[in-house]
C-alpha cells in the first residue's frame, strides 16, 4: 500500500531551488526520501517545476536512519549523517540544524555517486515547522513498521511462551 507523500517545494526565481518528497511504503516497510532539483521551466499555470524523474536522488530509510533523523529533529544530537552503499551507487544524507537570517532551519544535503564516479548533490532547507511535520510523519511510519498486526500465517514472531519446570 502506498500513502500520500509529504512534499516540500522550495523554488527560487533563479531556478536553483529544490523539492523534497517523503513517502512510506507498506510493501517494504520503509520510508523513501526523494529530493529533486528545480527545472528551468514553468508549467502551463506558471508554477515552477522539479525534475522528479531525472537527476533526483532517492534514499530508502530504515528504522535506524529514522531514529537518527528523529534524534536530530528533537535536538538530542547536533548533526545526522547517513551513508548507504550498493553495487551500483553510494548515497549520503547530511542534516544539520543551522541559523540563517535570524531563522532556524535544517539543511538537508543529499549526494549520490554512481559506479562511474558521476556525483550529484542536491540541498534543501526545511523550516522548524516543516521539520515538526516531518517528525510526525516518521512517527506514523514507525507505528506502521512495528505496531501494525502481522498478517502472515507463518510469522516468526512468537505468539506466546510455554514455561516448563
Image (cartoon, rainbow, N blue to C red):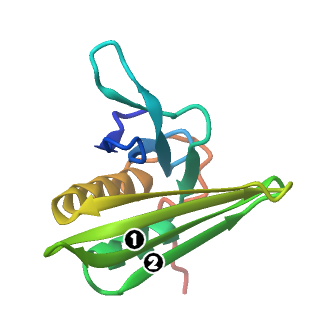
The image quarter containing residue 67 is bottom left
Q: What crowding class fits label 2: few (fewer than 14 Cα within 10 Å), some (14-19), or many (20 or more)?
A: some
Tell whether label 2 touches label 1 (CB within 8 Å): yes
Q: Earlier in the sequence, mark 1 or mark 2?
A: 1
As helix, strand or loop, the secondary structure at mark 2 comes to strand
Q: Which residue is mark 2?
A: 80
Say which of 26 and 48 sits in front: 48
What residue appears at the point 56 percent right and 53 percent down from the top-left corner?
60
What residue appears at the point 55 percent right and 41 percent down from the top-left corner?
152
The image quarter containing residue 120 is bottom right
Say which of 128 and 136 sits in front: 128
Side of 145 relative to 73 (left or right):
right
As helix, strand or loop, the secondary structure at mark 1 comes to helix
Quadrant for the C terminus, please. bottom right
Q: Which residue is mark 1?
A: 69
Q: Residue furthest top?
A: 44
* In the image, residue 6 above or below residue 104: above
Q: Where in the figure is residue 33, as x and y percent of width and height? A: 47, 50
Quadrant for the N terminus, please. top left
Is there any visible trace of residue 81 in the rendered image? yes
Say which of 155 and 44 sits in front: 44
What residue appears at the point 35 percent right and 87 percent down from the top-left corner?
77
Amino acid at each position: 500500500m502506498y500513502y500520500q507523500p509529504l512534499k516540500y517545494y522550495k523554488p527560487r526565481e533563479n531556478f536553483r531551488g529544490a523539492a523534497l518528497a517523503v513517502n512510506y511504503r507498506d510493501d517494504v516497510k520503509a520510508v523513501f526520501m526523494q529530493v529533486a532539483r528545480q527545472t528551468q521551466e514553468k508549467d502551463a499555470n506558471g508554477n515552477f517545476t522539479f525534475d522528479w524523474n531525472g537527476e533526483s536522488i532517492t534514499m530508502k530509510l530504515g528504522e535506524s536512519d529514522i531514529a537518527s533523523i528523529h534524534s536530530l529533529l528533537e535536538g538530542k544530537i547536533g548533526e545526522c549523517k547517513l551513508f548507504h552503499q550498493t553495487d551500483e551507487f553510494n548515497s549520503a544524507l547530511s542534516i544539520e540544524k543551522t541559523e540563517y537570517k535570524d531563522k532556524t532551519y535544517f539543511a538537508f544535503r543529499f549526494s549520490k555517486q554512481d559506479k562511474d564516479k558521476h556525483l550529484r548533490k542536491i540541498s534543501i532547507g526545511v523550516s522548524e515547522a516543516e521539520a515538526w511535520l516531518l517528525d510526525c510523519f516518521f512517527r506514523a511510519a514507525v507505528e506502521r513498521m512495528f505496531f501494525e498486526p502481522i498478517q502472515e500465517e507463518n510469522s516468526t514472531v512468537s505468539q506466546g511462551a510455554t514455561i516448563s519446570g
